[in-house]
Amino acid sequence: MEIGYLAGLFDGEGCIHIPKVPLKSAVGFSYSLRVIFGMTHEPVIRAIAEQTGSAFCALRARKNPGAAHWKVAYQTQLCGEKAAQLLRDMMPFLIVKREEAILAIQLQDHITRYRNSAKRWTSEQRQSYEDYREGLRLQIKSLKQTVGAPDGMMANSEKLLCPASNGADGQPRAKQAQFKIVGGK
């Protein structure tokens, strides 16, 4: 799959998601980058997953009487530096999500730069770094609200995350049981 085609798919059927999860062992939050592709056409999502080395899953509609006729949606996602690298590769071709991608790359670069130094941070440094990351997350969220759906494919439900995400929304896998992994590496 050509990178330009992948970028076009991402502009229309993808999203950038920045989960904010409370730290269990310390005060504050953990931030991470997720680049997600989702659509009802399984072969395309399967091809993206194979090309990027990521898992893919089927998202089943929750128990909703009106959802019986809904198509199954498929999703794949990349996390962290792998997600940032894909955004860098797609950057020349992005139109709709270009500004979000720039901010997301800045966030991941900050996370990568300070990954192994968190234990040595003073409380002021911790607060400063967290404020920076939260600022980037809120800017990305703001762009979503002005351009289109609040969170790409996740516009209908913040809880629609693939189990391949390893609990990207901070929920334990048990709370994601309505999803079934159908493939992956």
Image (spheres, rainbow, N blue to C red):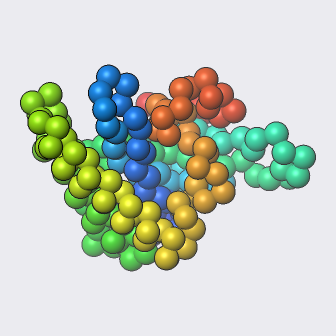
> Which is nearer the eye, 44 or 34?
34
Residue that sits furthest to the right in the current view? 65
Q: Position of residue 118 (x, y in %)?
A: 16, 33
Identity of the residue drawn at 53% across and 60% down:
151
Left or right of 126, for residue 7: right
Residue 112 can be seen, yes or no: no
Left or right of 154, for residue 52: left
Q: Position of residue 92 (x, y in %)?
A: 27, 72
Left or right of 95, for residue 157: right
Residue 14 can be seen, yes or no: yes
- Tell me the quadrant of the picture where the N terminus can be found: bottom left
Residue that sits furthest to the front in the current view? 124
Q: Position of residue 96 (x, y in %)?
A: 43, 75
Identity of the residue drawn at 55% across and 73% down:
148
- Tell me the quadrant of the picture where the C terminus can be found: top left
How many numbered discs, if any? 0
Q: Position of residue 147 (x, y in %)?
A: 49, 76
Left or right of 116, for residue 170: right
Identity of the residue drawn at 35% across and 31% down:
23
Identity of the residue drawn at 50% across and 40% down:
169
Instruction: Determine the image quadrant of residue 88.
Output: bottom left
> Which is nearer the eye, 68 or 5?
68
